[in-house]
Image (spheres, grey):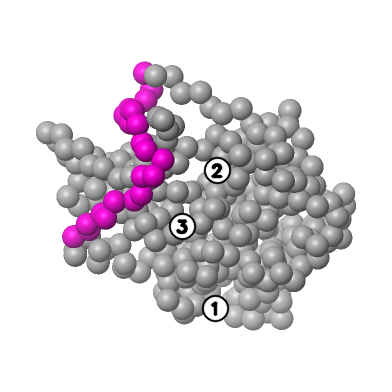
Amino acid sequence: MPKKVAIKKTKHKESDKRDGLDFSFLREIKLLKELHHENILGLLDVFIINNSLQKELWIVYEFMETDLRHMIEDRTIQLSAADCKSYMYMLLCGIEFLHSNWVLHRDICPGNLLISSEGILKIGDFGLAKKYGHENAKLTPEVVTRWYRAPELLLGARYYGRGVDMWSVGCVFAEMMLRCPYLAGDSEIDQLSKIFWALGTPTDKDWPGMDLLPGYIQFTPCEGSLESLFHFATDDAKELLKALLSINPNGRPTATDVLRNFNYFKSAPSRTPPEKLILHPPVKIKPEETAQVVETIKSETTPPDIKIKPDMMEMISSPG
């Protein structure tokens, strides 16, 4: 039986490629070849097309009907507390798996959280993902879509860990409850202002060492407005949201901690079963807009043994 798939083509950035290939795609392939989990987008195949000008790398993924961004924006769909809990559970299961394999996603946002026709949420877009060996690995702060970027990244931190993904999970959680982005800054400075206005301006006691970060600047003290804005949420939901959006990265829980120890998943209402989640209608693509067609991908297709040259592997594994 023919199988519907999704195909992603390389973006041609002269400043970011050698041998005609975009290295963010090579990183994504390398990671997805190793990561197999129900809540991680599946890699089906990879192929290269040679033309007279350059090589084109194409990645074939399992097809997903929609994403969480469309679900949030579609006001004809009611996202109940049980629905939000179901999506949060699947997201945290995927994050737990990534972090247990020492992978930071570094771009968790609703548009990168894909949803299958069976209602299963899967984390996609690993172009900014990075394997890291320990919490003291030196990394770039220029990651994560701004509205979901943790304050330590906005302040230029080069040493960070799983907390950056957990902050993003908190932003997604807030967005599902509000049905709009919670912290939508127009610039990095405005983003910090919105964070401190919403959650309170941290002091040296709240976040020791904050003033040592490269981009540190002083902000006018604010008390925060989370409690009043989320007055409709249950106490367990607010407890989790506050923990995920801890200004101090050391105060954020791990995905495992949330799944096992927080009351949010233990209290009513119970999670909506994935198959009972209402889906946003899939986006229809016109035939003339399809750049490449794969007629048949067998259901037993597995990722090929992609061979990456040593110089490419060095760049893939480099800090950043």
Of marks 1 and 2, which one's residue comes earlier in the chain? Answer: 2
Of discs 3 and 2, which sits in the foreground? 3
Q: In this view, does 26 lie above or below 243?
A: above
Work out which quarter of the rendered image holds the C terminus and state it: bottom left
**Image mark count:** 3
Residue under circle 1? 212
Q: Which amino acid does label 1 sit on?
A: Leu
Task: Tell me the magenta residue range.
Answer: 288-309
Q: Dots 3 and 2: beta carbons under 8 Å?
A: no
The quarter of the displayed image where residue 246 is located: bottom right
Q: In this view, does 242 lie above or below 146?
A: below
Name the spot of residue 32 as percent of width and height, x first: 40, 55
Classify mark 3: helix, strand or loop: loop
Viewer-proximal residue among 223 and 180: 180
The disc placed on residue 36 is 3
Q: Is residue 301 left or right of residue 173?
A: left
Q: What residue type is labelled 2?
A: Leu
The disc placed on residue 114 is 2
Of marks 3 and 2, which one's residue comes earlier in the chain? Answer: 3
Within 10 angstroms of label 1, few (less than 14), some, or many (20 or more) residues? few
